Amino acid sequence: MLWRPGKATARVRSADRLPPGQRLVKGWPVLHEGEIPTFDPLSWRFRVWGAVEAPVEWTWAELQSLPRVETVQDFHCVTTWSTYDNRWGGVAVSEVLGRARPLPTASHVLVHCFDGTGYTTNLPLSDFDRPANLFALTHGAAPLTPEHGGPLRLVVHHLYAWKSAKWVCGVEVLPGDVRGYWEERGYHNRADPWLEERYSYQE
């Protein structure tokens, strides 16, 4: 299944595809905190836990067996670069949440990564569980490379790219908001590129 934004969804605030303060680049810059982690497909696990009815844990092979989707979207980094028409393939966020079944009290998620830095990022459940969001396994026609977050990264197109965490290994579903790694270090808690929500002093 291929998901593309309609006119009434992704670009409703502007006729221009480029959010304010951004510049279009042709390449795909590599930015991350810490070293690129080593991936071991035999020991790797993906978990969903917290305020859910059915906590889940999958091996790498089990995760790859889940239904796949594709989406084509623009991608905007808080450091002011943007790229157009990124084709991502992977497992829909809705597929994962549908199996874990968040409780009525759930309002936010904290996404965890296995990069050794304690990296996390937080999202309201309403921003996390959108039709175009997915856990990406591929970019273009190729598997996602380690420098770009492979084997698995979250992709949340409508927010700045630090919310699209690299090297994801789990999602903690929460009844309230808990700030993530960059949010604790001065980045905006929501990160809407169309509103230039870059820093916490803007909240």
Image (tube, grey):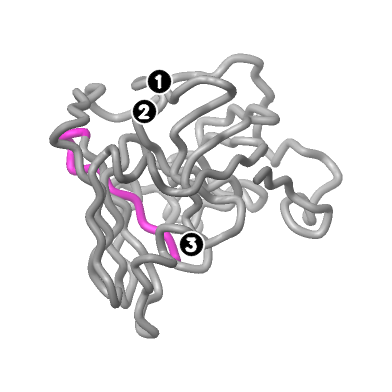
Q: Earlier along the polypeptide chain: callout 2 or callout 3?
A: 2
131 on left or right of 143? right
Residue under numbered circle 3: 203
Residue under numbered circle 2: 150
Count neighbours of disc 2 (C-alpha within 10 A) and say few if under 14, some if 14 to 19, many if 20 or more.
many
Magenta span of residues: 115-124
Say the numbered circle drawn on residue 145: 1
- Cα separation between marks 2 and 3: 32 Å
Confirm whether residue 184 shows in the render.
no
Q: Earlier along the polypeptide chain: callout 2 or callout 1?
A: 1
Choose mark 1 or mark 3, whichever is in front: 1
136 on left or right of 6? left
Say the numbered circle drawn on residue 66: none
Query: Which residue is painted at 58% across and 52% down in the image?
Result: 192
Query: Which residue is painted at 37% across and 39% down in the image?
Result: 64
Of residues 147 and 100, the one drawn nearer to the viewer in this rendering: 100
Count neighbours of disc 3 (C-alpha within 10 A) and say few if under 14, some if 14 to 19, many if 20 or more.
few
Q: Earlier along the polypeptide chain: callout 1 or callout 3?
A: 1
Residue type, numbered disc 1: Thr
- Cα separation between marks 1 and 3: 34 Å
Secondary structure category for the residue under label 2: loop
Q: Is residue 47 magenta?
A: no
35 on left or right of 75? left
Q: Are marks 2 and 1 in contact (CB under 8 Å)?
A: yes
Q: Quadrant of residue 100?
A: bottom left
Secondary structure category for the residue under label 1: loop
Secondary structure category for the residue under label 3: loop
